[in-house]
Image (tube, rainbow, N blue to C red):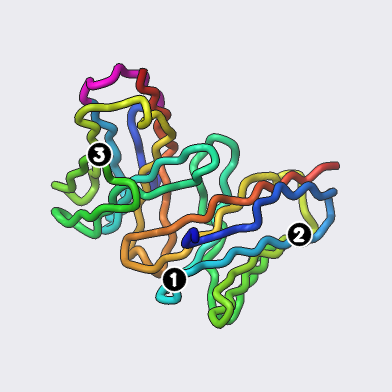
């Protein structure tokens, strides 16, 4: 089944403890992206990648890191999480980015205390 | 000004009604446009792409007006299952999707 898989689905962590949210797609998509969704602010792009080793900042990149060492994987790293990073996170992928929409993962609900 | 702005809603309509959502975008370089549907606390799912000539998919019709920089979604014969948040998306640059805040639709019996 074609899909984008995120893990974990739920995570509660403490301030400052490094964490990684994994994202993997099995559709051989070139484009991958991370979003966070907050009430009243909608979906905001954190980082995106157009191919292996090619990444760029979205609208809210502060406090996050990403890497794209393989085409299928695009992990999101929070080196020192803070409570304002408590949010619902989505990973998404797309074949080309322009003509086709993005397929989203099921989301990761992160709480930083 | 937000890059993509949507009708705030919420829209509450009876089954069978026709409802329309509008969305404006500020970046005239935007190349592609989409409508997504998001159910509560779940991932957004692509509803349809929006083409310059307008396009239809069953009860759903999407329109794009480049001159006025807005896109629209029309839902005919609303069903209870259409209740969701509808997100419009503009694609100004490769990889950089911009979402509107979403419009909440509730269809009641």
In depth, the one of B93 and A63 nearer the eye is A63
Q: How far apart are marks 3 and 1 (CA)?
A: 26 Å
Query: Which quarter shows the C terminus of chain A?
Result: top left
Q: Where is residue B109 in the image (x, y as percent from the top left)?
A: 85, 42
Q: Where is residue A38 in the image (x, y as percent from the top left)?
A: 48, 38
Indicate which label's residue lies in the foreground, 2 or 3: 3
Asked whether residue B58 is in view, the answer is no
Q: Where is residue B41 in the image (x, y as percent from the top left)?
A: 54, 35
Classify 10 Å Cα crowding around label 2: few (below 14), some (14-19), many (20 and above).
some
Q: Which mark is residue B27?
A: 1
Residue at 21 percent across and 41 percent down: it is A65
Answer whether residue A75 is magenta in the image: no
Image quadrant where residue B6 sits:
bottom right
Q: Residues at marks 1 and 2, common chain?
A: yes
Relative to residue A96, is residue B72 drawn left or right?
right
Q: Which residue position holds label 2? A: B19
Q: Which residue position holds label 3? A: A64
Residue at 23 percent across and 44 percent down: it is A73
Image quadrant where residue A4 sits:
top left
Asked whether residue A5 is in view, the answer is yes
Q: What element carries label 3?
A: loop
Q: Distance between the residues labelled 2 and 3?
A: 39 Å
Q: Which chain carries label 1?
A: B
């Amino acid at each position: 089944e074609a899909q984008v898989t995120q893990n974990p689905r739920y995570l509660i962590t403490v301030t400052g403890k490094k964490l990684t949210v994994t994202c993997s797609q099995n559709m051989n998509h070139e484009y991958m992206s991370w979003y966070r969704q907050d009430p009243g602010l909608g979906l905001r792009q954190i980082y995106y990648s157009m191919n292996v080793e090619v990444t760029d900042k979205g609208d809210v990149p502060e406090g996050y890191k990403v890497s794209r060492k393989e085409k299928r994987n695009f992990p999101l790293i929070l080196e020192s999480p803070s409570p304002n990073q408590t949010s619902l996170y989505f990973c998404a992928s797309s074949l080309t980015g322009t003509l086709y929409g993005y397929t989203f993962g099921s989301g990761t609900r992160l709480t930083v205390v | 000004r937000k890059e993509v702005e949507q009708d705030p809603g919420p829209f509450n309509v009876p089954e069978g009604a026709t409802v329309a959502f509008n969305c404006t975008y500020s970046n005239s370089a935007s190349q592609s446009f989409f409508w997504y549907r998001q159910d509560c606390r779940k991932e957004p799912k692509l509803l349809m792409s929006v083409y310059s000539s307008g396009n239809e998919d069953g009860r759903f019709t999407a329109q794009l007006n480049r001159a006025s920089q807005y896109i629209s979604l029309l839902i005919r014969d609303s069903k209870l299952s259409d209740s969701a948040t509808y997100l419009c998306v503009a694609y100004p640059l490769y990889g950089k999707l911009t979402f509107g805040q979403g419009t909440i639709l509730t269809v009641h019996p």
